Image: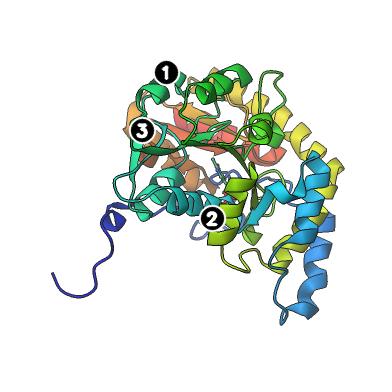
Amino acid sequence: MSGPQPKPGIMDIAPYVGGESHVDGVARVIRLASNETPLGPSPKAIAAYKKLAGELHRYPDGGAEALRTAIAEQWNLDRDHVVCSSGSDEIISLLARAYAGPADEILFSEHGFLMYSIASLAAGAAPKKAPESHLKLDVDAVLGAVTPQTRLVFVANPNNPTGTYLTRAELERLHGELRDDILLVVDAAYAEYADQNDYTSGVELATTQSNVLMLRTFSKIYGLAALRLGWAYGPKSVIDVLHRVRGPFNVNQAAQAAGMAAVRDRAHVAKAKAHNDKWRQWLGEKLGEIGLEITPSIGNFVLARFPGGLEMALAAADHLRRAGILVRGMVAYGLPDSLRITVGLEDENVALLDALIEFME
Ligand SMILES: *Cc1c(COP(=O)(O)O)cnc(C)c1O
């Protein structure tokens, strides 16, 4: 061994591979691999972004004051309990680095979001997975996997890539039985798509408890994935830690301006949700009818299991790619026989179904 060596754990990281976005020789690719909104952002957000072109030589507002104010108004929260970030991925990494290190453990469920594992290893901590039951987080399994070394528990609600969710009662029970020195992080990246009466983004616990943090993103329903914008809400003590470890200008000014406009455009969000409600149900029904097993999802995507296992799932993804349609393979998530399919525009969903019908024949 010669030359600089990274800290233990770093070389164990399997680099995050995002959804594909291009197919050689196909002009109009149908992108259903990254849970982006097919409607795009609010036109008001695009206008706010364009207006910034003349200001590129200026540093952004390091405290993201106006954006935090807009977020706090929209959700009726205390602005001082909100911190903004370059995507919610940044907060996941900052939390791992600030609260865990060598000899510590970070806990999440079996098919939890890949960034939890990457952030844990990057911080030198050990990622630990609790088994799920029926592709859903099992509260008892998570509690059973807690050790004296556990520092953080990540729960995506709903979870990506399964689309399943913990009810308010289940989340409260999980929190109630966790030690109070363990930070429970509720990653509610898809909260705007959820309207089930028993669903919670974790906002109530993040308001009242000293060890619960809620994460949100502008990458999904708000359609600003390219700008990288997320935020966290929770107890002042945790927000204070995040302010200390974040970069001084971690959120660029274009993201702040577009985010402010996006958060205020409730009509656009409602339109995106209505579109998703309709087409997620349609996809679930139609894909079920052609012999795929669909996990009930409350996000903007469905998880489809192929009866012929990994080989069949890979062949289906290849078939779709040849038709110019990109979906997400699930090998890295421990679901090799499945593909995750984002809800698209009407013609995109129809094209996907047609291509899969052809494949299944
Ligand atoms: C998409 C997603 C995020 C958001 O990531 P950004 O960094 O904000 O783009 C966070 N958590 C989960 C579970 C996601 O699926």
Q: Is residue 328 left or right of residue 336?
A: right
Q: Name the residue under label 2.
A: 90
Q: Is residue 320 left or right of residue 249?
A: left
Neighbour tally class for label 1: few under 14, some 14-19, many 20 plus, Cα within 10 Å: some
- Amino acid of disc 3: Lys
Q: Residue at x 55, y 57 (%)?
A: 26
Q: Nearer the viewer, mark 1 or mark 3?
A: 1
Query: Along the polypeptide, which appears first: circle 1 or circle 2?
Result: 2
Q: Name the residue under label 3.
A: 129
| Colour scheme of the rendered structure | rainbow
**In the rendered image, the vertical position of residue 66 relative to residue 184, given as above or below:** below
Which element is circle 3 on? Answer: strand
Q: Name the residue under label 1.
A: 140
Q: Quadrant of the N terminus?
A: bottom left
**In the rendered image, the vertical position of residue 31 relative to residue 304, given as above or below:** below
Query: Along the polypeptide, which appears first: circle 1 or circle 3?
Result: 3
Q: On residue 200, which mark appears? A: none
Query: Along the polypeptide, which appears first: circle 3 or circle 2?
Result: 2
Q: Can residue 229 be seen in this view?
A: no
Question: Residue 61 at x, y = what percent?
Answer: 73, 68
Which element is circle 2 on? Answer: helix
Q: Can residue 2 be seen in this view?
A: yes
Measure the C-alpha gap from mark 1 to mark 2: 29 Å
Question: Residue 124 at x, y = what percent?
Answer: 33, 53
Measure the C-alpha gap from mark 1 to mark 3: 13 Å
Q: Is residue 49 left or right of residue 100?
A: right
- Amino acid of disc 1: Asp
Residue behind label 2 places its C-beta within 8 angstroms of ligand 1: yes
- Amino acid of disc 2: Glu
Neighbour tally class for label 3: few under 14, some 14-19, many 20 plus, Cα within 10 Å: some
Q: Residue at x 56, y 60 (%)?
A: 244
